[in-house]
Amino acid sequence: MEFGILGPLLVRDAEGDRPVAAAKQRALLAALLVRRGQVVPADVLADTVWDGWPPRTAATTLRNYVMRLRKALGEAGHRLATEAGGYLLVVAAEEFDADRFTRLRDLGHDRLRNGDAEQAAAHYEAALALWRGPALVDVPSEALRRSEAGRLAEARLDVLEGRAEAALALGRHTELLGELRTLTAAHPEREHLWAQLMTALYRSGRQSEALAVYGEVRRVLADELGVDPGSEIRTVHGRILRADPALAAPARPAARTRTVLVTPFQLPPGLTDFTGRTEPAADLAALLTADNRRAPLIAVVSGQPGAGKSALVQHAAHDARGAYPDGILYADLRGSRRQPAAPHAVLGSFLLALGVPAAAVPQDTDSRTALFRSLLAGRRTLVVLDDARDSAHIRPLMPAGPGNSALVTARTRLPDLGGSHALHLGPLPADEARQFLARLVGPARADAEPRALGQLAAACGGLPLALRICGARLAARPSWTVRHLVERIVDEGRALDELCLGSLDVRAAFAAGCESLDPPTARAFHLLALAPTDTVGLSTAARLLGEPPARAERVLERLTDAGLLTAREPGRYRYEPLLRAYARERARHRPAQAWSDPHAPRRAALAG
């Protein structure tokens, strides 16, 4: 879950942004966020929401606003609790952009005090990247904006000064000049910015301009504030006049902290028997090799477990290698497992692969992301992220710069990943499934039993994982006919037992795909599979699940997004054959106590 006030008010969960349209509810949410984890008295909230002029009905109206805000927060609505005399919003520090900004600012200040300008700059960059506009810009509360927006704007200026100080320590004075001129014009009262501008000009060989700035700041301070320059500006002025060696530019840091010497190629070996997926492979090739992009390409390939997402993406990445001369990074994110790979660790491995020394890899995730994107900016690198859990899992790993691309595979669709190209894989078409099997078993066997080969492809439902297992089993059993394996698989009761060979296991793949489902969605997936047909209508599903149609539709859509159901038309949901067999198996073997009593009649009705 993400909450943000550094710009327009932001609420985002796994399903995407959750806009809070009503102005008073935005003010209420913002007031709770800035006091997250604390009980905020109702009268304080009323003063904030109505800007010091609450109506006589404020208490009742506030309760209604809280109720509506809970609904707007979706599944996170339970975080907004009613306490004695007030309300409490539970938000973790890492979920709130203002807290993350403060932590990064403090880390930057600490590293700067300890002489580590490179790390300080990375922390400051990550802190500034959290800002999406003026703080609380769309919150209609003058009191809140005065107290919080002003404080946050001051903190942002503090970070800008810190970043400039780090850049001066790193010998990047020339790059600073434009930014410092803009900042001094906007904030003439910040004397430290003037001192930094004079220093940057002097170190850039522009002594006369540095002295002219001193004259300018004297006039500005006298005219606007009626004061003379402070000691810091006077000290810098004196050092410029004396050509003090202490003011000279420092030596540039060692090249190891700035130069990437390695061109990584981390892709697993390509599959020599990759077959089919003609259209999606062509679509990916066109995306990966397109020129003149204004932003990085992000392509997400989703689909049911075993659909061949990883094989397709790796095949496309190998084919597009020539378009990415600066390398290809790869990570198995293990998003469908109980312990997914942490973005923090993945970023560390990427930075090491790009040539960053271990001692220079930042300690926190935000700074690693900032350094990763800085290194990739201006380059042409492909990042392949296999088996992502959700959008939050991969956001820190997204590259910067229009020349870079990210290929992502995920069991679920990622509609909240802004700017991405979505590609959803269904079963292989019948002709491609037969072609794949023929390639696996060899031409002699395929030509001997063409009809049985088509039946085997159909029995596998066109699922690439099942087809690969069948091909491998036939290759390991030369005495078997294709027809013999068909007879073993068409029996629903034993199909999943047959579709297992070493580490290739259809049942295990389906189980992993269901692990991330919340209990109501998992229950619906198993229960509705007991219906007499493989297609379930929305009204039928709502009646059998005992839910209102709108809530039942949300559950069915989550199953569709997870690749566990197919919606070929609105309101009609279909199980693929092997997924239905798995769901029916789980439903029939589920302990009786796992089904609540009110639903027992529905289960019996579904079972026929």
Image: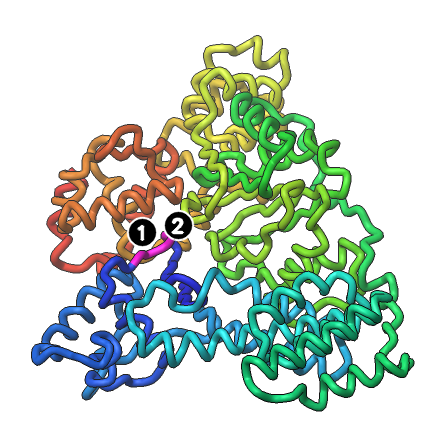
Which of 134 and 412 lies nearest the eye of the viewer?
A: 134
Q: Quadrant of residue 31?
A: bottom left
Tell me the residue at 30%/43% (across/down).
Answer: 557
C-beta proximity under 8 Å, tags 2 and 1: yes
Which of 159 and 411 lies nearest the eye of the viewer?
A: 159
| Badge 1 density bin: few <14, some 14–19, many ≥20, Cα 10 Å | some
Residue 111 appears left or right of 523: right
Outermost residue, bottom side: 231
Tell me the residue at 58%/42% (across/down).
Answer: 295
Residue 489 in percent (x, y) is at 42, 29
Which of 276 and 106 lies nearest the eye of the viewer?
A: 106
Pointer 2 residue: 514
Residue 172 appears left or right of 388: right
Q: Is residue 36 magenta?
A: no
Q: Separation of disc 2 and disc 1 at Cα?
A: 7 Å
Q: Amino acid at mark 2?
A: Cys
Residue 522, numbered circle: 1
Up-down: is 338 above or below 87?
above
Specify whether residue 456 is in view.
Answer: no
Up-down: is 63 above or below 557?
below
Which quadrant of the rendered structure holds the C terminus? top left
Q: Is residue 18 magenta?
A: yes
- For mark 2, give the secondary structure: helix
Which quadrant of the rendered structure holds the N terminus? bottom left
| Badge 2 density bin: few <14, some 14–19, many ≥20, Cα 10 Å | many
Q: Amino acid at mark 1?
A: Ala
Tell me the residue at 70%/58% (across/down).
Answer: 349
What stretch of residues is rendered in magenta? 15-19
Q: Quadrant of residue 479?
A: top right
